[in-house]
Image (spheres, rainbow, N blue to C red):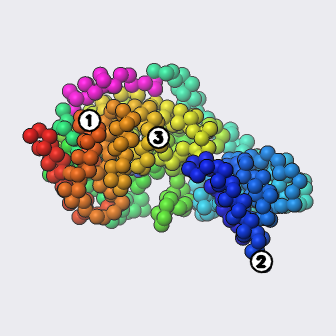
């Protein structure tokens, strides 16, 4: 019987560690005392067991699983328990260095082998990807291939290293091939990253930016906007599928998308939204869309993994140096701006989220890869600006999600993740307004990071928590624009005008009015039109009611 205990490696649990350890000892004491029980295997993925290891060694369980990829094993002393060494990375899709994994396993004293985590993070089978480049495929291991690797290492443990040398050598050869393959290292990309200086990460003084933006954008008090996507209707999906199958020409598909954008712009104008979005109809997914347009990425056909609940996602593979060959979103935004006199908000996915929702190369620090993605986005942002787009939103919903479990690892993570966002966005003029959007409501946890992103406007989830973020925002003295979501888009429920009015009033009660934006708490792509239109009308009516109260 396997019992998964990732909590034992986490420092993000509020219960004091000593209580966790006592509870662990107590729980396994009880489970161990059950008569005629199965053998117990406690698996602790995602980090080191540290001080929980002696507790488990003293407990009556038969086997302990340790993550030797994210964590390490100091010493088990002499134990009769089976130590299961998780040396095959369950978290990524790389075939990796099998010989090094075997040596680590042998040195750890483990007597059994597994993946470091559950395999539910990885897609099923590399052989289900007939369209992937065969060379890239030879560097990959999805779940089936990882199980094969585990079996190989298990054989090596029992029969000795010599018994598996063919498999180890083949993996080593694939790794060498990957190292030298074209595109994995691009001289121009590397030279550009190496030449970065502090100024490339800094937009300069906020006060003068604010002034320039007020003059350029002339937005009303409590500007209204949405987070970017409008409902991805069955019709949009149908057209995309037809285009992908070649049943629709590029021109026909583009004309359809333009008509869809025009419809969404007209709708926002009619409802009275101040900052207009194009609705993202051209995007299958906010990360995959960019992956498909950037060098260094590949996309799978069948590489599905669970995202949350019943939702699945097909992460892209980031295997090489990242560069942008040509503008990606610029024509869509330019077209959108041509349809309206109101400001159009350009919409990009940020570097941290692109990494978080892809399978990322493991042969260099994430920080380096993040800066490459950031530089590609920086070029896109400069092109958007040159095309007359005065507001650009760079979404980072995954900023919190990638935050390391161990507190000691958090500062360096926040350093590079925030740094890559700043690198992407710091190339613009003062009057260009940079927005970001984050998808969670524990503002307090990463308030410093949000502050350091230095975006001019940040939208954040807040409706579900009834504006509980507002006190955190107020006490942090956050000085830039903030849009605490005024309704929950995860449900089809339409918020009433009174309800939204009350939430806006809560925000205004603690945050200076000139900082406050009014928006839903996330993108509308999973919603239907009926509830979307009604909800947005109520949001605008509520905003107008508050404006009238304030100016009276
Ligand atoms: N701009 C994206 C959208 O509106 C943001 C999605 C997200 O936060 N996950 O869909
Ligand atoms: Zn969101």
Q: Is residue 97 magenta?
A: no
Sequence-first disc among 1 and 2: 2
Front of the two marks 1 and 2: 2
Left/right placement of residue 307 relative to residue 172 reads left
Q: Which residue is mark 1?
A: 512
Q: Position of residue 249 (x, y in %)?
A: 35, 56
Q: Position of residue 242 (x, y in %)?
A: 37, 63
Q: Residue at x 22, y 29 (%)?
A: 214
User: What label does residue 271 carry, if any?
Assistant: none
Q: Is mark 1 within 8 Å of ligand 2?
A: no
Q: Which residue in the rendered view is the most extreme toward the bottom?
A: 36
Near-viewer residue (431 or 184) = 431
Secondary structure mainly formed by the magenta segment = helix
Measured in 3D between alpha carbons, the distance from the residue under mark 1 to the one under mark 2, in whole angstroms, is 64 Å
Q: Which residue is mark 3?
A: 446
Secondary structure, mark 2, is loop
Q: Position of residue 195 (x, y in %)?
A: 54, 22
Q: Which residues are magenta?
A: 200-217
Q: Mark 2 Cα within 10 Å, few/some/many (few <14, many 20+)?
A: few
Q: Is mark 3 within 8 Å of ligand 2?
A: no
Near-viewer residue (262 or 25) = 25
Q: Which residue is mark 2?
A: 35
């Amino acid at each position: 019987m396997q019992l998964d205990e990732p909590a034992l490696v986490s420092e993000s649990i509020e219960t004091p560690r000593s209580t966790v350890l006592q509870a662990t000892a107590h729980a396994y004491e009880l489970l161990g005392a059950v008569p005629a029980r199965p053998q117990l295997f406690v698996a602790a993925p995602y980090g080191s067991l540290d001080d929980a290891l002696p507790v488990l060694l003293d407990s009556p369980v038969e086997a302990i699983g340790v993550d030797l990829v994210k964590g390490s094993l100091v010493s088990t002393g002499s134990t009769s328990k089976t130590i299961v060494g998780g040396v095959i990375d369950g978290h990524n899709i790389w075939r990796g260095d099998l010989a090094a994994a075997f040596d680590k396993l042998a040195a750890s004293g483990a007597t059994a082998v597994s993946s470091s985590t559950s395999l539910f993070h990885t897609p099923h089978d590399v052989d289900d990807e007939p369209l992937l480049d065969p060379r890239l495929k030879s560097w990959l291991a999805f779940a089936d291939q990882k199980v094969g690797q585990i079996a190989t290492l298990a054989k090596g443990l029992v029969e000795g290293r010599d018994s598996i040398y063919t498999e180890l050598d083949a993996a080593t050869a694939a790794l060498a091939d990957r190292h030298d393959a074209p595109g994995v290292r691009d001289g121009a990309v590397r030279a550009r990253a190496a030449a970065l200086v502090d100024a490339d990460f800094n937009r300069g003084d906020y006060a003068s930016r604010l002034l320039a933006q007020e003059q350029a954008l002339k937005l009303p008090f409590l500007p209204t906007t949405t987070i970017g996507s409008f409902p991805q209707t069955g019709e949009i999906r149908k057209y995309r599928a037809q285009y992908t199958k070649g049943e629709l020409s590029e021109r026909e598909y583009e004309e359809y998308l333009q008509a869809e954008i025009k419809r969404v712009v007209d709708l926002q104008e009619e409802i009275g939204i101040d900052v207009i979005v194009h609705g993202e109809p051209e995007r299958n997914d906010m990360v995959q869309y960019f992956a498909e347009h950037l060098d260094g990425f590949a996309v799978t056909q069948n590489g599905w993994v669970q995202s949350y609940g019943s939702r699945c996602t097909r992460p892209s593979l980031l295997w090489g140096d990242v560069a942008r060959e040509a503008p990606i979103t610029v024509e869509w935004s330019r077209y959108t701006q041509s349809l309206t006199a109101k400001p159009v908000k350009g919409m990009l996915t940020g570097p941290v989220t692109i990494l978080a929702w892809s399978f990322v190369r493991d042969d260099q620090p994430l920080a380096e890869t993040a800066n490459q993605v950031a530089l590609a986005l920086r070029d896109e942002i400069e092109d958007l600006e040159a095309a007359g787009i005065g507001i650009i939103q760079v979404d980072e919903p995954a900023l919190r999600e990638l935050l390391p479990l161990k507190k000691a690892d958090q500062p360096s993570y926040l350093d590079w993740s925030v740094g890559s966002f700043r690198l992407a966005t710091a190339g613009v003029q003062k009057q260009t307004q940079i927005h970001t959007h984050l998808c969670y409501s524990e503002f307090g946890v990463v308030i410093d990071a949000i502050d350091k992103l230095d975006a001019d406007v940040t939208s954040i989830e807040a409706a579900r928590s009834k504006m509980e973020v507002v006190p955190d925002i107020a006490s942090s003295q956050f000085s830039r624009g903030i849009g605490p979501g005024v309704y929950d888009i995860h449900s089809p429920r339409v918020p009433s005008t009174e309800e939204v009015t009350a939430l806006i009033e809560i925000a205004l009660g603690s945050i200076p009015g000139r900082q406050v934006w009014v928006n839903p708490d996330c993108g509308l792509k999973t919603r239907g039109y009926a509830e979307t239109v009604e909800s947005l009308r109520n949001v605008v009516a509520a905003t107008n009611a508050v404006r009238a109260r304030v100016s009276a």
